């Protein structure tokens, strides 16, 4: 898996070396020391096992080591410290390897300690210091990233679910819950006490509204009129402190527009949304549907192990608060018909045509 001279120069197409890209996607600690990857949008380079959010593939460059990355103008990540050998790197790497080699279990700190020869308290402390996350958080993120990578590589959902070590669909949804986290209490109070920033811009589908809290994107809507889109947002969060724009919105809007232009095949944005347990399950399942493909409402229900929940799946799709990020437009009727779409069937048809044309 060592980087070639061509990659050491910073080649920015990870598809040319799927093993290296998979190592980054799955945070494979066994690849640490063999290469580093850099993200052009941030100017930072990292170890393959870095616990930070995964970058879009078209923003990544691979390098043989820290020196090459520095020469190209990138700076070291302060989270995974790729430019130095952390005093506990060996211990941390053994923990990561144990987790990856035992995906079917959720090892306790005591079990990990026995496996690597360390006390649980010492292990927890040094692992958090070195990676920024706990062993449990690392294990959850590794399984979820492994699941996503297998789905993107063509595995069916059921096979990927178990091969990634979830054991059941409920464990997958439990793992992903923290990424979709507005509290029910805050939501029911109309966003009381929340600061919500929003912007409306032109897009190929008309007008695009994106709104976010300090935690992540809470609303993505499509329409024809700025006032109409803003009115929907204000009605949904009547007690929030609404403000125009916001620091992260420009970056997230750029990613969404890039997707609508056919330049991106996915949107992995941080979310701050409210959902019921069932909606959470449906929305997470929708995010596993590969770009350019579709599923029927019946297929989604069956994948959830709830064959009789077809209508409920449709209702959950209609309640999706973040259009495009959760791709409810990829779900069709059993007969191949478009079914419904909150933002108009013409937009749903255009989105599907765009994805299938650029897949």
Image: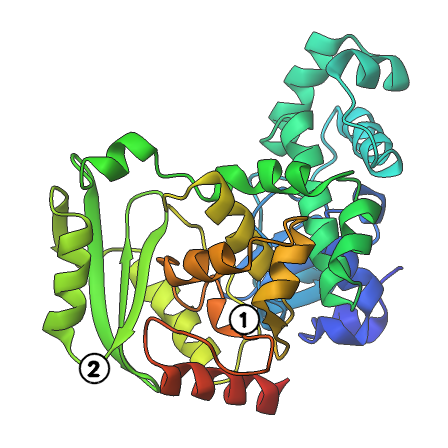
118 to the left or right of 75: right
What's the distance in space between the residues labelled 2 and 1, CA to CA?
23 Å
Across and down, in percent, residue 34 comes to 84, 52
**What's the residue at 76%, 26% (across, down)?**
106
Residue 185 showing in the rendered view = yes
| Numbered label tally | 2
Name the residue located 16 percent from the left edge and 34 percent from the top edge. 193
Which of pointers 2 and 1 indicates the residue nearer the eye? 1
Towards the viewer: 289 or 65? 289
- Is 114 rendered above or below residue 43? above
The N terminus: image quadrant: bottom right
Q: Which colour style is shown?
A: rainbow
Instruction: Identify the mark at residue 331; answer none if there is no mark.
Output: 1
Residue at x 26% of width, y 39% of height: 187
Expressed as whole percent of the image width and height from the top left, the position of residue 73 reads 57, 63
Residue nearer the viewer, 1 or 330? 330
Q: Which disc is residue 77 wearing?
A: none
Above or below, 85 against 66 in this view is above
Residue 331, position in %: x, y? 54, 71
Q: In the figure, 277 relative to 318: above or below?
A: above
Mark number, residue 224: 2
| Relative image position of residue 178 (x, y in whole percent) | 50, 37
Task: Name the element at disc 2.
Answer: loop
Mark nearer the N terminus (2 vs 1): 2
Between 202 and 314, the one lying in front of the other is 314
- Residue at the far front: name it: 308
Is 183 left or right of 19, judged from the image as shown? left
Residue found at x 73% / y 62%: 151
Under circle 1, the secondary element is: strand
- Image quadrant assignment for residue 302: bottom right
């Amino acid at each position: 898996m060592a980087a070639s001279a061509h990659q050491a120069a910073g080649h920015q197409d990870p598809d040319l070396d799927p093993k290296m890209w998979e190592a980054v996607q799955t945070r494979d600690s066994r690849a640490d020391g063999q290469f580093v990857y850099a993200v052009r949008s941030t100017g930072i380079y990292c170890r393959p096992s870095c616990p930070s959010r995964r970058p879009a593939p078209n923003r990544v460059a691979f390098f043989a080591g820290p020196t090459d990355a520095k020469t190209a103008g990138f700076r070291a990540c302060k989270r995974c410290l790729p430019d130095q050998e952390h005093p506990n790197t060996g211990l941390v790497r053994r923990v990561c390897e144990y987790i990856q080699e035992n995906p079917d279990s959720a090892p306790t700190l005591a079990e990990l300690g026995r496996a690597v020869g360390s006390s649980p308290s010492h292990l927890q402390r040094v692992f958090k210091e070195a990676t920024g996350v706990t062993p449990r958080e690392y294990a959850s993120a590794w399984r979820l990233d492994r699941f996503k990578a297998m789905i993107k590589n063509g595995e069916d959902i059921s096979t990927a679910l178990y091969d990634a070590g979830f054991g059941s669909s409920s464990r997958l949804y439990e793992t992903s819950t923290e990424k979709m986290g507005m509290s029910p209490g805050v939501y029911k109070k109309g966003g009381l006490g929340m600061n919500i920033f929003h912007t409306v811009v032109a897009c190929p589908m008309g007008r695009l509204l994106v709104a976010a809290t300090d935690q992540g994107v809470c609303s993505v809507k499509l329409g024809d009129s700025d006032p109409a889109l803003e009115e929907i947002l204000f009605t949904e969060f009547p007690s929030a402190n609404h403000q125009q724009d916001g620091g992260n919105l420009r970056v997230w809007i750029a990613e969404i527009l890039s997707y609508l232009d056919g330049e991106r095949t996915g949107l992995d944005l941080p979310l701050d949304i409210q959902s019921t347990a069932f909606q959470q399950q449906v929305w997470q399942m929708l995010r596993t549907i590969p770009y350019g493909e579709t599923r029927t409402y019946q297929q989604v229900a069956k994948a959830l192990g709830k064959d009789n929940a077809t209508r409920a799946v449709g209702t959950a799709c209609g309640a999706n608060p973040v259009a495009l990020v959760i791709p409810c437009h990829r779900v069709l009727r059993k007969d191949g018909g478009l079914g419904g779409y909150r933002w108009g069937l013409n937009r749903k048809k255009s989105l599907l045509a765009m994805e299938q044309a650029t897949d």
